[in-house]
Image (cartoon, rainbow, N blue to C red):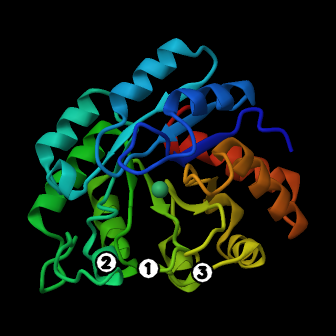
Amino acid sequence: MTLQGAIDTHVHAGPDVRPRKSTAYELARAAQAAGMRAIVLKNHHCSTVPLAAALSEALPGIRVLGGLVLNHAVGGFNLEAVDAALRMGAAQIWMPTLSAENECAYRGHAGAGLQALDEAGRPRPELVAVIRRIARSGAVLGTGHLSARETAAVVELARQEGVRAILVTHPEIDFIAMDPEVQCALRGPGLFFERCFCRTGFRRDWAGLAADIQRVGVESTVLATDLGQPDNPHPVDGLEIIAVRLTEQGIGTDALRRMMVENPAIALGLD
Ligand SMILES: [Zn+2]
């Protein structure tokens, strides 16, 4: 399948704290050469918005979009950091990833992380403020590495507050492992499950991923790579591999276009 018009809503490149497969410039050029419409650069430690803007200006024909992940490095649920990123054009604000208590506990550092909910299970006030700000901007809310339970609560709150679009970040990863039944219950306008390249640490192989797509729905799925790790395929190759593997699992071309071209454009508000 051609990548003409395809969008990768979740991809990593350098400069980064960790080694990456390619620099953001190399990645954006490769995506441009493949005819892709847009990529969203994600960095766990800083805003990618200025870098993305410069690359968009330098590379005609492709939109390079950026955002901010609310980890400790930017002060967690830091309204000022969110406000600045959005005013500079952030396409997506992600809930904590590496700094989510859910991931910290999984990696043996319980107590070191950020939680969306208080002891009584209510959304924390600083989270509510952030979500209201995202709603006002029209940007995408990414659920990051919150637990499945926190994610469901954040989705409910985001809907109440009028957030335009939600990407549920790789529900298949080990430490989220959101049950497909729960995913079905969360479906609704503007919400997409961002299903990523199957790799170590994911609960699903390609057959399992295809089964989840069939069960939860093509119309609520966005396919993205989350690649950029040195030992995995280049992200642009990875997007193509996703299409090949899912085709082998019986997912048709129309469905692939919907999940790689149309749904991500709707999520990002590009149309
Ligand atoms: Zn990622």
Of residues 38 and 189, which is closer to you in this image? 38
Of residues 126 and 216, which is closer to you in this image? 126
Q: Residue at x 52, y 66 (%)?
A: 170
The residue tagged with tag 2: helix, strand or loop?
helix
Q: Which mark is residue 203?
A: 3
What kind of residue is marked 2?
Asn
Q: CA distance from mark 1 to mark 2?
A: 7 Å
**Can residue 220 be seen in the rendering of this structure?**
yes
Q: Looking at the image, tell me whether mark 2 or mark 3 is earlier in sequence order.
A: 2
Q: Quadrant of residue 16?
A: top left
The correct choice, above or below, for 130 with respect to 34 in the image is below
Q: Residue at x 31, y 77 (%)?
A: 102
The correct choice, above or below, for 219 with respect to 26 in the image is below
Q: Which residue is mark 1?
A: 175
Of residues 108 and 116, which is closer to you in this image? 108
Q: Residue at x 69, y 42 (%)?
A: 236
Q: Quadrant of the N terminus?
A: top right
Q: Which mark is residue 102?
A: 2
The spot of residue 76 in percent (x, y) is: 18, 57
